[in-house]
Amino acid sequence: MIRIVRSTIIDAPTDRVWAFLRDFNGHDRWHPAVGKSEIERNQTSDKVGCVRHFFLRDGSGLRERLLTMSDLEQTFSYCLLDTPVPLFNYVAHVRLVPVTDGDRTFWDWRCTFTTRKGEEAEMTRMVSEDIYEAGFAAVRAHLAAGSPAEARA
Amino acid sequence: MARVFVSSVINGRSDRVWARVRDFNGLPSWHPGIAESRIENGEPSDKIGCVRDFRLRNGDRIREKLLGLSDFDLFCTYSILESPMGVENYVATLRLTPVTDGERTFAEWTAEFDCAPEREAELVSNIGGGVFQGGFDALKRQFGG
């Protein structure tokens, strides 16, 4: 089992960051790796159990299921159902916590998964850098710019 | 039940910040509000259940019991046994979490307690703004921001 933890401080209140993140179908508006996303069966993106079907910029498709979501704790969890890369038993957790000293946000993004022998390093790098750290940078940039994605959120 | 939540970002790696705060008898070495402290019955300060008997700079004396300590999750939970504050069922947790992009630490200090309703706002302000934020401000100075 591989365990990844990435975290950062965003210079905005948690409510602003959460408005961005809580839309489980909204990552195509801010994450640079995600091309197009839709929720299956026409469900709403805050229905626990809903599945987002999305495509990466390279055209590969993935499906992920929303496992938990809390507006009180500002957290959500999801798992991968189908993926073209060898990420198995992948469960991820996103958690926002207010930094009361400065009205900023602590954002923690973590997961566990298994993979094929020999691919541990590449899968760890991809999830840590291409997904989590790139996601941090993208949300930070969108919030700084006051982007249309935020206005729609 | 009154609740206090205060959090901050310390400019140091979480293992270094933890080394500073993990000693349940070590408040006088880093918290400016605490004058002196001892552990009762000569017990080690990381023995779960040990009691610290300490004195604030204003002269108040408080006894607190260590309920939980984790070197893995970096948290310390304790309760107040005796204090002049007028609180009941007081349980607090100090928790550190690494901020992985940069050598920083996210620090949270929470408390829950019962008290007379008319004193709640004052107690929340004194505990959160005074004791907890005062401790974080000191750590921020000690770790250079």
Image (tube, helix red, strand yellow):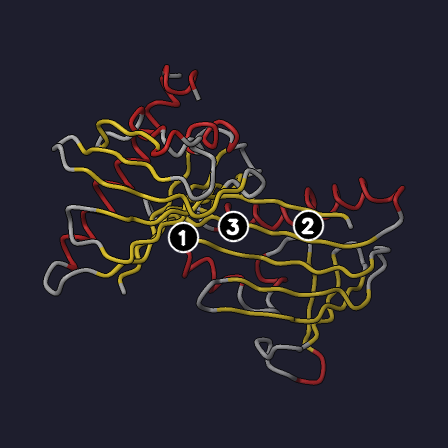
Q: Position of residue B144 (x, y in %)?
A: 44, 45
Q: Quadrant of residue A42?
A: top left
Question: Mark 1 = which residue?
Answer: B98
Of pointers 2 and 1, the one earlier in the residue sequence: 1
Q: Quadrant of residue A66?
A: top left
Please say if B66 is above or below B116: below
Query: As drawn, which residue projects farthest toward the front?
Result: A41
Q: Amino acid at mark 1?
A: Pro
Q: Give neighbour class at mark 2: few <14, some 14-19, many 20+ (Cα, 10 Å).
A: some
For image coordinates 88% across by 44% down, the residue present is: B117
For image coordinates 36% across by 33% down, the residue present is: A41
Q: Please state which of the two labelled residues, at mark 2 or mark 3, is closer to the viewer.
A: 3
Q: Quadrant of the N terminus of chain A?
A: bottom left
Of pointers 2 and 3, the one earlier in the residue sequence: 3
Q: Nearer the viewer, residue B15 or A49?
A: A49
Q: Quadrant of residue A145?
A: top left
Q: Chain of mark 3?
A: B
Circles 2 and 3 on the same subunit:
yes
For image coordinates 71% across by 80% down, the residue present is: B40
Q: Chain of mark 2?
A: B
Question: Mark 3 = which residue?
Answer: B107
Tell me the CA gap for discs 1 and 3: 9 Å
Q: Nearer the viewer, residue A61 or B22?
A: A61
Q: Position of residue A115 (x, y in %)?
A: 19, 60
Q: Position of residue B96 (x, y in %)?
A: 49, 55
Question: Mark 2 = which residue?
Answer: B131
Q: Nearer the viewer, residue B131 or A103?
A: A103
Q: Give neighbour class at mark 3: few <14, some 14-19, many 20+ (Cα, 10 Å).
A: many
Please say if B20 is above or below B112: below
Of pointers 1 and 3, the one earlier in the residue sequence: 1
Q: Helix or strand or loop: what does disc 3 sit on?
A: strand
